[in-house]
Image (spheres, rainbow, N blue to C red):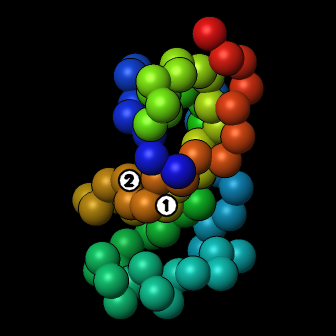
Amino acid sequence: MEFELLGSIETLETIASGTGLRDRRRLVREYGAGKWRKMKGIATVRLADGTICEAELHWYEAHGIGKKEIKFKRPIDVK
């Protein structure tokens, strides 16, 4: 789903890290070695149809590499 972040991501939580991260081999191959973690958080986003809402987002991140593959999971509060 296409979306645009309108603010910072809040309520950060680690979902998986280390050997518990299923896609770790692929992430290292595509982006490089690092301490990869799967994260989730809540942010205000604008959807492709112009709707603005709070949404749960998931992504992968590693120190020195940054956030990769940010995914829109579900809307929380439509404004």
Front-most of residues 16 and 49: 49
Q: Is residue 39 left or right of residue 78?
A: left
Identify the residue at the far top of this view.
79
Q: At label 1, which amino acid type do we have?
A: Tyr
Q: Is residue 8 above or below residue 57?
A: above
Residue at horizontal 53 percent and vertical 81 percent from the top: 24
In the rendered structure, which disc, 1 or 2, sits on the residue that comes first in sequence?
1
The spot of residue 78 in percent (x, y) is 67, 17
Q: Residues within 10 Å of mark 2 (few under 14, many from 20)?
A: some
Front-most of residues 3 and 62: 3
- Residues under numbered marks 1 and 2 in contact, where contact means CB atoms less than 8 Å apart: yes
Q: Residues within 10 Å of mark 1 (few under 14, many from 20)?
A: many
Residue at horizontal 62 percent and vertical 10 percent from the top: 79
Q: Is residue 66 left or right of residue 61?
A: left
Q: Is residue 75 above or below residue 14?
A: above
Residue at horizontal 40 percent and vertical 31 percent from the top: 5
What residue is pinned by disc 1?
60
